[in-house]
Image (cartoon, rainbow, N blue to C red):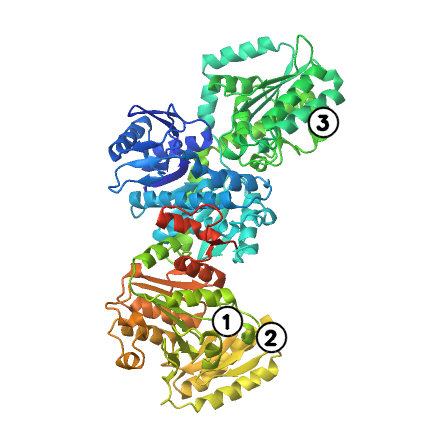
Amino acid sequence: MARVISVIFCIPNTVSYENGKWAVSQRRGTSALFDGLNYLSARGPHTILGWTGEIKTTNASEVLHISKDERQKLEKELSTASSAKVTPVWLQDSLDDKGDVATLKDQRRWRQFAEHELYTLFHYKQHEPTDGRAERLWWADFFKMNQMFADRIVETYTPGDVIWIHDYHLILLPSMLRQRLPTAQIGYFLHIPFPSSEFLRCLARRKEILQGPLGANLVGFQSYGYCRHFVSCSKRILHFESTAAGVDAYGAHVAVDAFPIGIDADTIRKQAFEDPNVDEKIQGIRDMYAGKRIIVGHDRLDTVRGVAQKLQAFEIFLDRYPHWKDKVVLIQVTSPTSIEEEKEDSEHKISNKISDLVSRINGRYGSLSFSPVQHYPQYISKEEYLALLRVADVGLITSVRDGMNTTSLEYVVCQEGNYGPLILSEFSGTAGSLTSAMTINPWDLYGVAETLDEALRMSPEERKIQHQKLYERVTSNTVQAWADNFLNRLSSTIASHGAASVTPVLDKTAVLAQFRKADKRLFCFDYDGTLTPIVKDPNAAIPSDRVLRTLKTLAADPKNAVWIISGRDQAFLDEWMGHIPELGLSAEHGSFIRHPMEDTWENITETFDMSWQQDVIKIMQEYTEATQGSFIERKKVAVTWHYRRADPEFGEYQARECQKTLEATVAKKYEVEVMTGKANVEVRPTFVNKGEIVKRLIREYSEPPRESAINKNPSADPTMASPGRPDFVLCSGDDFTDEDMFRALNASDLPNEHVFSCTIGASSKQTLASWHLLEPADMISTLSLLNGTGIDAQDLGSLAVVDGSVPEGRSLPIREV
């Protein structure tokens, strides 16, 4: 059986460090996930990998310096404290020069972006606008944290391992791992809700957040609604081909499905019914509230848990149904939140609001001897918790947005024999699984009050029937079944679609790191669809000021050789690129070439018979007359039929027919080939292609400089004058003609880690390139990152990883997009 590496944000233990000694204890919360991890450990080879969490000390603000020996001691202690192998991820601020002592300063920083930005928006809440400086630094930390997780996994990984990544803190990790482990089996499961596209598009880093999970083979959610939102966002925001079954991303299919998490029902039942301490607690509660019907709520103190709505609805219930006064008590337990956003909730002051509501209800409907609301803002013991669930007459859950509410599942198990009704918010991820529960809209306070009255009046027979359906569901869909279902589906997805064909999103961190190391760099770019977007009128595809500035800055570096290798003719390239003398230009797919610092063009095809063009034009003219909006572009070497302005469907049909006709006639008569591009069909000589130009450039830049160039201008193309071969190559294009460049690079003997071939455009296309970017703006952002000027905000993470820090304040050299 393959080893499973479960990657979670925090390990299942809290860690303390005092006087050089470690102390390890069980971490509170996420019990269903931890139960699932325990099951995987019993099931077969299993490693749990996660952050240590904030390491507790007497002085919370203390800067920790932890040596490698001390870190290894903790790793051993964690392994003895758990049934699984636990591998901690050390999120240090810095390491000393020897890589021995790790310095930990502000340990909360790693939570900020996820818990302030993602958690908030994924639960359909938005912040007031700010100047964005803090958010940009949070993003850099978030990116760097995910990168450190990726580093640790790569150290641990062996071929054949299954990597299962959990939750929103690690949402970038699947894509980062795919960049470094292209054939790995990767699953990703989100435990919280996923919002609709209308909400997600409000997130500044929405594209990067969506791209993250798409590095996985399988993406899982708590409910089908969240699956639908994710697929819709991929289509609407990233423009990826999507169906209900998944998303076509980076040349591969990413399966998307719902896997509602369960609980360890057998363990809960044993703890609830076989522990005498629980029975003792139950008796104490019954004695305290003798003659009262008990409504139980147990929630975390988060605004999304709907505790305020629950209290408001209970107040309305007591007002509308006065016959229940002094006969019903609401026992509400609110445990402290673990979410940074909620801890700093100065605006809503949820805890104060809840306290005010409790006081108001008890003051209005209570007496000296009885308070209808018993509120406990604290952690309670496991025995007290299970006793409450067993003794309750009604379970009330009013989440306004929730992933999977395990309290509802545990309530069902604990109600065996008592059959108390479950009232469950329709906005909880559990509602889709527990369809027999009494579902309510927590915003409809009068509706909740009415449902409370209905639940309390329900006959014993009705209660039993409802409970039996719920109990069967909960006990058959356990956390063990959840884990098995997810891993089995991951295995079948990989068997059906494979992982080897994936072309991951460009690893800008690796690009920047190699760029910094290199002394001789070669850049090769297509033009249309790579540096500028595809437009209906080819003459309107002129480079923006940012593109020109970026290319000029890049080409001005004496270590860089920058070439535009385009299907455009000489006149166009001269008009828009000719004023940058350091640029090398190649026109008409390699038919013409102009070296940097030179004025004249070299015609590579001047000895070739071009009489074939008349036959091609004659055939293309027939299709032009039959296809409104199409036109012919005659270049010096190639002839192109464009249909960008035509009706898309009819244009594609005519293009296929035109291609067939050309291949059956001209292609058999002359040494030419018929190529299909972005809304065009082109005919060119067989020996002319962009791949031949790339081969020539690699050869020329690996040799001493040409004598003609030196005699004409001693400073010509200084990159050619430097010794050695290129140790950094970035080549990018967007259509079929650019595959020749990628093929040439793949056949070269340059080291793989020095070569970055990157296709631009449709996520579903198969390519010979090693990397993928979605649109020309992404390539310009990458070049700006390399230049170190006008850096886009989403690239601060790569900068932070390579440089170790990000400049702070308004002087930050970034550009928001």
Question: Which kind of residue does numbered mark 1 sit on?
Answer: Lys
**Where 244 falls versus 145 (above or below)?**
below
Say if residue 192 shows up in the picture.
no
| Disc 2 + disc 1, Cβ < 8 Å | no
- x and y percent of residue 472 in the render? 53, 30
**Disc 2 and disc 3 in contact, CB within 8 angstroms:** no
Distance of label 2 from label 1 (alpha carbons): 13 Å
Instruction: Return the mark for residue 75.
Output: none
Residue type, label 2: Ala
Q: Which residue is mark 1?
A: 678
> Quick check: 410 above or below 616?
above
**Visible in this render: residue 338?**
yes
Question: Residue 646: which disc?
Answer: 2
472 sits left or right of 771 in the view? right
Q: Nearer the viewer, residue 467 or 17?
A: 17
Q: How far across and down, in percent of the image, does residue 668 sit?
A: 41, 85
Count of marks, rendered view: 3
- Which residue: 62% across, 9% down? 290
SS at mark 1 in the image: loop
Q: Secondary structure under badge 3? A: helix
Image depth: mark 2 or mark 3 in front: 2
x, y (%) of residue 673? 42, 80
Q: Secondary structure at mark 2?
A: loop
* Measured Cα–Cα span from mark 2 to mark 3: 60 Å
Camera-nearest residue between 405 and 693: 693
In the rendered image of this protein, does residue 22 appear above or below residue 792? above
Q: Residue at x 29, y 72 (%)?
A: 720
Picture coordinates of residue 708 (x, y %)? 29, 82
Under mark 3, the amino acid is: Glu
Labelled disc at residue 450: 3
